[in-house]
Amino acid sequence: MTEVLLIVGLLVAVFVGYNIGGATTGPAFGPAVGANVITKLMAAALMAIFFFLGAVTIGPQVVDTLGQELVHDTGIFTMRSNVAVLFFIGGALFVGNYAGVPASTSMTAVGAIAALGLATGELNLSVLGEIVVWWIVAPIIGFWVAGVIGRYFYPQINAWIAIDSTDTDGPPMVSVDRSGIAPRLQFRADGDRREAVGALVVIGIGCLMGFSSGTSNIANAIAPIYGTGDVDMLPLILIGSAAVAIGCFTIARRTLDTLGNDITNLPLTAAIVVAVISSVIVIGLSWIGIPASFVVIATMSIIGLGWGRATRTTTLSEAARGEETPVSVGALTAEEEGERSPKIGEEEPEDIPKASDLFDPSTTARVILMQNIVPMLSTVGAFLTFQFVPIFGV
């Protein structure tokens, strides 16, 4: 019976990994796909590779936190309870993926595991408190770092980026040439050297995001099973990463469309800045064993970047005199990639577009709604199951 439950647990873990692949590929490579830099197929392949690298290097720290430290007694991770925990994690993420919304996999997983600990009286409140504190602090850090970059460095970065993100009808800027003995990258014939360098930067940032996702999200698929002590860490990482790869090549197409085309007209420059800030924060938190929500950090970074860019209409001396600065996230669309911005204080507030010019209101509302509903489904469903369904009692 134990072996049967172990097999079932592994299958459910694969289901969770599959949905993680679907939920995380969009945030990582949505900008590159939306700008027609690479195809969805190449995005899936790169995501699978770099997710695994992050999972096998830094990921074990987060696995230890969720599988060993979040609860006082790891004996509650029975195979029966693991199947339920992983079912609620995977089921909730599947709801988000089906809706084309990349939900927070870390919040969804922590919620389900914490629900098990709460229902059994084994929840380690100090560890949960540390995780929640970082969930609050990390987006604030992202906001302020992005704000400083938006005010003082965004124009220089934007002037350097020169990729036409509107040319989505032709072939992708970067593709793989398989005509030779070994495959190699090739660039679109009408692209110049500057565009080629910019394309490589965009792809590199996506790979960094894939790596950061692996460091944090591998634990969401395998931590409950690792907590039982029945399976070693490395085989679980291999299984989880393979499942993520399947999700990257299949259901991720929905979130790639949402993040690359539907939700926002976020300029490529802004997408690069947000990706770097969010990825570095996530990797840093994973290094200390904290499962981080990339989606929330990235959202606050976008807001901070837009706020910083909008404040360029006012100098510090003018602000000290009490002059009001109209602030809008839409400021990020004030110029095209490769175009220089006016110096601080030289731009007129009416030159700053409204936020509605950047975000599609209906799609944005759907994303925000689902990003809150998905973790809630996982947490509440798991708690009610462990509290009131005897078969899953531990």
Image (cartoon, rainbow, N blue to C red):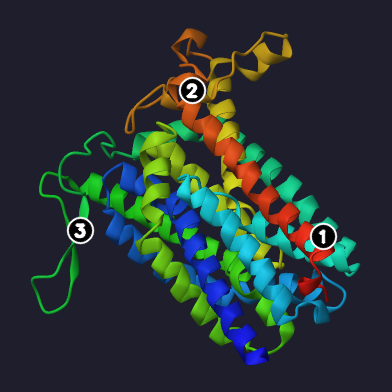
Residue furthest right in the image = 121
Q: In which quarter of the image is residue 46?
A: bottom left
Image coords of residue 206 (percent x, y)? 42, 55
Residue at the image position 59 percent from the left and 18 percent from the top: 327
Residue at the disc numbered 2: 331
Q: Quadrant of residue 385?
A: bottom right
Asked if residue 287 can be seen in this view, the reply is no
For mark 1, does the 10 Å Cα neighbourhood hold few (<14), some (14 to 19), or many (20 or more) residues?
A: some
Image coords of residue 184 (percent x, y)? 19, 69
185 on left or right of 72: left
Query: Distance between the Cα atoms at labels 1 and 2?
Result: 37 Å
Asked if residue 197 can be seen in this view, the reply is yes
Residue at the image position 49 percent from the left and 48 percent from the top: 275
Q: Of the two numbered discs 3 and 2 on the same chain, state the one appearing first in sequence.
A: 3
Residue at the disc numbered 1: 128
Residue at the disc numbered 3: 175
The one of 71 and 320 positioned closer to us in this rendering: 71
Which three-letter amino acid code belongs to the residue tagged 3? Answer: Ser
Q: Of the two numbered discs 1 and 2 on the same chain, state the one appearing first in sequence.
A: 1
Element type where label 3 sits in the image: strand
